[in-house]
């Protein structure tokens, strides 16, 4: 079990997968828009092998996240065990914390912002504990995004034409180009269109030479006057 976990949590595997995905993304960007009836979006980003790469990356990230959680959760126990098994030794430090009284030493460490755990006559001092959870939370956030992206493949794209107060339990499935059962009844009680005006750009051309004469930019509700001898 440990060799499998070591493999899937390997940084080398992470770098290999990221490099592979980046290469695919480059080809998916510069390749011609269509090859016959297959669009590059389907050829690359919707393909089975691209999803397998994403699945491996998600598995790699999940293994790293598991190890990070285990390390953070077991840090206190591991450090206490190491502290109890080690021999006392005087070491140089940037801080003058030399003290024969454990209570006084604990008090001084607490004043410096450390969390204190006593184990007999030994003191375990730690701080910045909240920051240790930054990496696991980041990993979980990325995993949540990846799971959401994969779950989106379970959905479908369809069209339903309805009038107000009408209802339907079918939709037009574009994959099979036929009506399919929706699984529930959808009723339209109210419909209110919302308009988002955008800039509309068009040009005028000479009828004979097809030479562009002038370019216009307008918005909804505005009027543009065109000369009678010009065609849009």
Image (cartoon, rainbow, N blue to C red):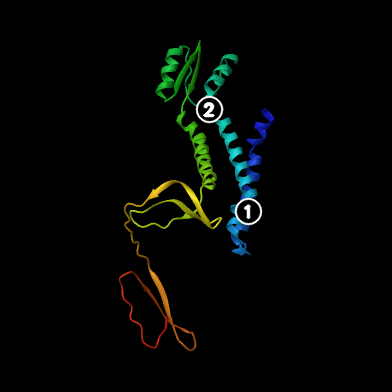
Query: Which residue appears at 56% of the width and 31% of the height?
Result: 68
Nearer the observer, 147 or 16: 147
Element type where label 2 sits in the image:
helix
Q: Residue at x 53, y 40 (%)?
A: 143
Give the vertical position of 61 relative to 175 (above or below).
above
Reply above or below: 220 against 176: below
Q: Is residue 87 something that shows in the picture? A: no
Q: Nearer the viewer, residue 165 or 231?
A: 165
On-image quarter of the N terminus: top right
Q: In front here: 40 or 25?
A: 40
Task: Indicate the secondary structure of the residue bearing disc 1.
Answer: helix
Residue sitting farthest toward the right: 3
Q: Residues within 10 Å of mark 1 (few under 14, many from 20)?
A: some
Q: Quadrant of residue 197?
A: bottom left
Instruction: Determine which residue is flagged by label 2.
Output: 72
Residue, x 35% and y 52% (percent of image)? 188
Instruction: Determine the image quadrant of residue 195.
Output: bottom left
Q: Is residue 38 left or right of residue 161?
A: right
How packed mark 2 is, by other alpha carbons closer than 10 Å (few <14, some 14-19, many 20 or more), is: some
Where does the image place residue 58, in percent across and percent down from the top left? Answer: 58, 40
Residue marked by disc 1: 24
User: In the shown orientation, is residue 177 left or right of residue 106?
Assistant: right
């Amino acid at each position: 079990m440990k060799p499998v976990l070591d493999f899937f949590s390997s940084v080398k595997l992470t770098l290999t997968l990221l490099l592979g995905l980046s290469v695919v993304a480059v080809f998916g960007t510069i390749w011609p828009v269509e090859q016959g009836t297959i669009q590059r979006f389907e050829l690359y980003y919707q393909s089975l092998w691209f999803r397998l790469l994403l699945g491996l990356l998600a598995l790699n990230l999940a293994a790293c996240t598991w190890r990070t959680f285990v390390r953070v959760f077991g840090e206190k126990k591991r450090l206490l065990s190491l502290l109890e098994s080690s021999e006392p030794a005087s070491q140089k430090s940037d801080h003058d914390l030399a003290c024969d009284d454990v209570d006084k030493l604990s008090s001084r460490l607490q004043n410096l912002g450390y969390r204190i755990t006593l184990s007999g006559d030994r003191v375990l001092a730690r701080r910045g504990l909240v920051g240790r959870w930054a990496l696991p939370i980041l990993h979980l956030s990325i995993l949540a995004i990846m799971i959401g992206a994969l779950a989106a493949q379970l959905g479908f794209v369809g069209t339903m034409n309805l009038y107000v107060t009408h209802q339907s339990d079918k939709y037009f499935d574009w994959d099979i180009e036929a009506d399919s059962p929706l699984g529930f009844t959808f009723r339209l009680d109210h419909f209110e269109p919302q308009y988002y005006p955008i800039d509309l750009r068009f040009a005028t051309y000479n009828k004979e030479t097809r030479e562009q004469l002038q370019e216009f930019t307008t918005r909804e509700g505005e009027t543009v006057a065109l000369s009678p001898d010009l065609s849009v």
